[in-house]
Each structure stands twice: as C-alpha cells, then as structure tokens.
Amino acid sequence: MNIVVIGATGMIGKPVTRELISAGFNITLLVRNAQKARQLFTGVNILQGDVFNTDSLVAAFKGQDAVYISLAPPHNGRPDHILPEREGIDNIIAAAQQTGIRRIVLLSSLIQQYNNTNGFHWWVFDIKQAAVEKIKASGIPYTIFYPSTFMESIDQLMLRGNRIMLAGRSLAPMHFIAGSDYGKQVAWSFRKLTTENREYNIQGPAAWNWDEASQRFIRCYTVRKLKIMKVPAAMLRWMGALNTTIGYGAKISEALNNFSEQFVSETTWNELDKPLITIETYAEKLTRIQ
C-alpha cells in the first residue's frame, strides 16, 4: 500500500511514521521542511508542500492509496486565522477526491469530547469536531482515531529543564498511550481495513492523573533528577488573557484536568492489538537512548 503521511515530523507523527515504515508500507511524506524530514527518516519519498497549497497536495496524492493526517492547531492560533485542521482539511479532502485516494485516516482527539461540558467551550475543539464531520462526509472510506493523552507530552511538552510543569489541579485519570504503541495500531488498521469506515478510541494500559503520571515518570527517568512544579490554574488563565500561546495551554489543561475519561478502547484492543508500553517503561527507554 502507498501511504502519504501529513504531519510526519510532529511529536506523534514521528513514531507513527516509523511504525508505518517498519510495517513495510511505501511511505511518502508531505512536509514543509524537507531537510528536517530527511534527518529523521531514511528510505522514504519526501515531498515539500503544505496543506494550504492544493497543487502540492494533488502532486503528493497521485498514485497513492491512502493519506494519514496528523495535524495540530498552532498554539498561537486564533479563530480568524487560516488553520491546518480547518482550511487544510478542506484542501486535503478536495485533493483526495480529485486523485482517487481510497482511504483517509485522521488523528483526532478523545479530549475534544469534553467540549460543551461543565460550562467549558473552546473553538479549537469545535474545529476538531468539524474536521471529523468533513472527513465522514467526503465519500471516501475513513478511519478516525481518538487518542487519550500521549506519554510524549510529559517529556516533550511538560518538561522544562529539571521540572515537569503541571497546571492546576489534575482530577481526572487519563489512559496515557505511547506514540509507538499507537503507531502499531495505525499500521494494523491499514493492513486490516478495505472499504469500511471505522472509528477507534486509543488508550493505554493504565490510567493516571498528571501528578501520578509525572511521579511514575520521575522514578524511572534517571538521566537527571526531576521534580514537579505546579502553576495555579487562575494564574495561567490570567497570563493566557495576555498571551495566546499561554491561553492555549490554560484551555487544554482545564479540559485534561476535568474530563472524566472512561475506558472505551476494548474494541480497538481486540481489532488492533493491546498497547504494552507503560509510563515506567517509556521513561526507562528514554533513559537508555539519552
């Protein structure tokens, strides 16, 4: 199968792309920074392009069977901006329809289900939900993944120096999932699915709140001594009113801290295999490679 990957150099795009390559698929990467992609991946076709450039999408999609989409809203984005998960998704669908793509696979989010709950509303989640509906309405067979929180968030987003930065009070446990485990499930879906439409919840083997997850990570990460630092939610919201990027962090933290996540991935585990990586084994692996 020939698969175009959009978003391969992102935090979760990297482990997913590695798993797709390992599974033996013919992978083409559509990236904005071709030099960065070449440093990360070998043995794949790399094309420079952008989801806002329909011509580059059409060129990348010709002769391909499927497209995997891993997009995230820019943390400094605003509703009136041109956005990857809105205008970019529109362009991807149009190019896929024009070139005969036979499957669209979208990385969405489980946490977006918190939108319009407990008085919470965020335009970013509106866009994520709209992207799902656009894919479903495209007429192209689709697979949509709704992952819980990725373990990569701990070391790649929350870790600053020797501190893991936590915002507010974490009330709700999350089924943390490692990007490589998720990537294996993506690869299995490409092997198994033909013309059917499927949606999968993606969750890891155990549920922890941010404090518990961070403590478990710290115990097994021995590169340097880490500690947890907490920022009050009220302070983050106040700072977020002045800075768009901090405001993004305040909103996503509020949703993650309060979303009552239930285990809903039994079907996924049955069809695409059970994830095995725990936060402890994830931290130990990081220790070995750093």
Image (cartoon, rainbow, N blue to C red):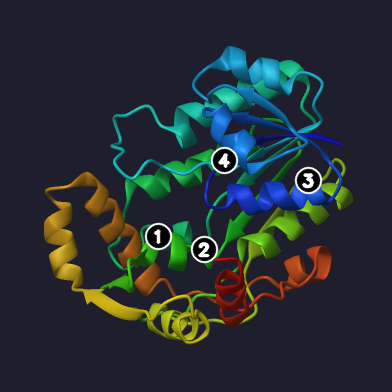
Q: Amino acid at mark 3?
A: Ile
Label 1 secondary element: helix
Query: What is the distance, in whole Å, between disc 4 and disc 3 at their CAs?
Result: 29 Å
Which residue is under mark 3? 21
- Residue 124 lies, with reference to residue 111, above or below; the image says above
Nearest to N terminus: mark 2 or mark 1: 2
Q: Amino acid at mark 2?
A: Glu
Check contact, mark 2 vs mark 1: CB within 8 A.
Answer: yes
Residue drawn where x is 72% and y is 22% of the image: 61
Q: Nearer the viewer, residue 276 or 22?
A: 22
Label of residue 133 in the image: 4
Label 2 secondary element: helix
- Residue 22 lies, with reference to residue 159, above or below; the image says above
Q: Nearer the viewer, residue 80 or 69?
A: 69
Which residue is under mark 1? 157
Q: Could you say where residue 105 lies in the image, as x and y percent from the top left?
A: 69, 42
Figure label count: 4
Task: Give the quadrant of the C terminus.
Answer: bottom right
